[in-house]
Image (tube, grey):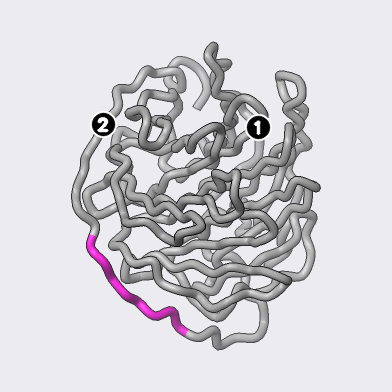
Amino acid sequence: MAGKRFRRTIAAAASVGVVGLATVIPATMASAAPPGPAAGLNPSVTETATGAVTVYYTASDGSVFTVPGGGGTPSQVGTGRIATAPAAIVAGTTQVVFGVTSGGGLWTATQSGGKWGAWTSLGGTLTSQPGAAFEGPNAADYAVFARGTNGAVWARDHTSAGWGAWHSDGGNLLAGTGPAAAADNGVYLLVVGTNKQLYIAKAGLTGFSGAGGLTTATPGLASIPGSVVGFVRGTDNVAYYHKFVSTTPGWHAMGGKFASGLGAAAAGSGTYTAGQGTDGNVYRATGNWSTYPPKLSGWGAVTAHE
């Protein structure tokens, strides 16, 4: 991923179509024992303003589990099953998780007061895992994104009035990859194009422009004060980061070996990045971005499945 190949300039591609609706009812969870992460699906991360971190992963039977960021006993998110990696955000004091079923429909569940509500359908005919971002300032202001059947990014926005209609944010994503999203005075999207290179856009405001890099896995994106930071698994399976500023510092290795894409979240100047290692377990690294280059923790295990 490093070197000249990783700094290639890319032209944006756009494709817009119509997303239909599909209603697929999630199956009931049958096993009481927490299964391990499904092979190749990246975890998602949420981090509160106080630094409390939760990691979400899709299990081998399609159920969704959470585990504390420092490791611990997994707990199940409702009784639904999905076919993709999950996407999770913190909206006020509520945790919101999204996933796409085998039929292409988007489903969501929320946790408030320590209890998970039932999974509910948001429709759509989608072809990737979702990405999501909390926009604020109100707790009800967030959005979810995924690849549609035409390869473009499709989105639904949530406000205090409820869910808006599906709309396209353009792009032409590599099959098998989904968009990463993070809010910084608007929502940024980081995606993988059909040429396996990375693109970034401000949803609804700019088109996609080249971000360098080369990958075949869904990236992660997190918002820190005044900037956003992208995380990606390179073609050498190592993790890389990129701080997006007016004078771009480029992509830099942060070690590890991964079998999935990466998930990321931030609280203040701190980031938390997670990915599935080649042994099938979820690993995490923290970053302190109060100075640049960031201070990175190295990778530690979150799950311990054999």
Instruction: Give the main secondary structure, helix, strand or loop, of the magenta stretch.
Output: loop
Front residue of this view, candidates 143 and 217: 143
Give the residue furthest to the front. 161
- Examine the structure image and report whether residue 24 is included in the region drawn in magenta: yes
Which SS class for mark 2?
Answer: loop
- Whether residue 91 is visible, yes or no, is yes
Give the amino acid type for the residue marked by disc 2 in the picture: Ala
State which quadrant residue 221 falls in: top right
Q: Which residue is mark 1?
A: 224
Q: Nearer the viewer, mark 1 or mark 2?
A: 1
- Amino acid type at image mark 1: Ile
Q: Residue at x 34, y 67 (%)?
A: 123
Left or right: residue 180 versus residue 257 is: left
Instruction: Give the x, y percent position of residue 104.
Output: 32, 65
Residue drawn at the location 55% of the way across and 55% of the way down: 140
* Chain-order first, disc 1 or disc 2: 2
Q: Which residue is mark 2?
A: 13
Residue at far left of view: 17
Residue drawn 62% across the image and 54% down it = 91
Looking at the rendering, the stretch of residues picked out in magenta corresponds to 20-27
Residue at the image position 23 percent from the left and 63 percent from the top? 20
Residue 169 relative to residue 187: left or right: left
Dot 1 surroundings within 10 Å: few (below 14), some, or many (20 or more)?
A: many
| Magenta stretch contains residue 279 | no
Q: CA distance from mark 1 to mark 2?
A: 27 Å
Mark 1 vs 2: CB contact within 8 A: no
Residue 16 vs 109, above or below: the answer is: above
The quadrant in which residue 35 appears is bottom right
Residue 69 at x, y = what percent? 75, 55
Quadrant of the image for the C terminus?
bottom right
Mark 1 element type = strand
